[in-house]
Image: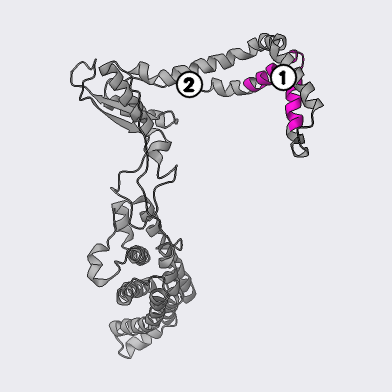
Amino acid sequence: MNFQLNEPFRQFAYLKELLLEYPGKATDFQKALHQSQLSKAAENLLIFLDSTAILSQQSISWFSQFRSFLEHAFSDISDPNSFGNLTTTAVEQMTPYLDCMSLDRFRFVSTAHEMEETAVCLQQYNLYYSGLVFDFDNSDGEKFSMNTSYQIRHVTQMVDSTMDMEDQPRLVFDRNSPFYGLRYLTYGFSFLQEAVDRAIIQLITGAKPDLGVYFQQEPFPSSIKNVFTVENFLGFFVLMSFIVPGMMLVKNIVHEKEMKLKEHMRIMGLGDSIHFISWATVSFVINFISISIVAMLLVYGHILQYTDYSLLMTLYILYMFSWISFSSFLTTFYSNANYAGIASCFYTFLFAYPYHFARKHRSPFFIKLSLMLPSSCLGFGSTLISKANEIDEAHWDKLHKIYHQG
């Protein structure tokens, strides 16, 4: 197996040795060229080209370069522009890079566990590429059978993730990106699999396979995708519509506490629950007008045209209730109205960042933790509705299909 897999490396190593030995033999090589018939042929060709006018004015630049090559390529080694000197300079510039190439790439270990520990260590220095784990029928592992199976343990960044079984419905184009959609080919997984298969066939049958693997993508229909991805900023802009009303709610309640107005109203018989409900009602009316306009612009402005208006309003009303409650909760920690208003704006943006982190890392625990914050809930809700809108599922009768995957 090692002999078959090392065949390309042996060929490259032979070429590498020839290149490294070339500068020491370039003098003899150039001397042989100078004494050969090629030098006389070049002289005769120069005489022929100079005596004819077959080249047009447009090819003068090309002709001058070709003429210079014929004049110097087969001359003596003392000519710095001779073929031997030019190639020697090129090889000497390549030598530092050739010395850095390690062609002894295969290492053998006893068990899969030992390979995993070695791979973890090598990945820290970017020295691990792939691993092969063979399942032998016999216990000593000295030969392959007709039913030999093996596993390829590639670097995780060089293969597709196994978190999903298929592409998302919103990905309407074929997987033609070499560094993302075609990673199994670009980073060598498929070629390694083919090399191992051919080596096993040769070891078992004694015959070298003549045919290799041919790859071709399945036909994909023409598609049109709107690059205006509303899910990336929908929650943020809705959040912006709550900044000023939320800040004014917090600031007014704290202002009453700062000016001792709440104590006076309490002396006059105003209960805390009535006081909270009154401010919540005022904030609800102001924000309801705002979210109604936002929802109308999104649905009837053909941004979320496949979404039920009532479904979108339900999401925003639920967020409005949670934010009004949270704003009232913030008022208990401040006694200065200006500081409270600034803090309200700060927390509005701060509590939206866990949504972006949870969406990036896909941690179930972090997602549940971020859903405790109103701004993050709005972000997740807006993303789910925008994704459902793309496949025409943002309706009440298809509500069970709208959920977060992962």
Q: Which residue is mark 1?
A: 73
Asked whether residue 80 is in view, the answer is no
Q: Residue furthest right?
A: 51
Q: Please report the bounds of the magenta region as a residue range.
A: 63-91
Specify few, some or many for label 2: CA neighbours under 10 Å numbering under 14, 14-19, or 20 or more: few
Question: Is 82 colored magenta in this rendering?
Answer: yes
* Overall secondary structure of the magenta section: helix
Is residue 316 visible in the rendered structure shown here? yes
At 44% from the left and 45% from the top, the residue drawn is 177
| Residue 187 horizontal/vertical position (percent) | 42, 35
In this rendering, the answer to whether 230 lies above or below 361 is below
Question: In the image, which is nearer the foreground, mark 1 or mark 2?
Answer: 1
- Amino acid at pointer 2: Ser
* Circle 1 Cα neighbour tier, 10 Å, few/some/many (<14 / 14–19 / ≥20): many
Q: Secondary structure at mark 2?
A: loop
Which sits in the foreground, 83 or 12?
Answer: 83
Q: Are marks 1 and 2 in contact (CB under 8 Å)?
A: no
Quarter of the image for residue 180 reads top left
In terms of image quadrants, where is residue 350?
A: bottom left
Tell me which residue sits at (37%, 87%) in the image. 264
Disc 1 residue type?
Ala
Specify the label residue 133 is tagged with. Answer: none
Q: Secondary structure at mark 1?
A: loop
Q: Which residue occupies the foreground of this view, 21 or 339?
A: 21
Q: Which mark is residue 102?
A: 2
Residue lying furthest left in this view? 138
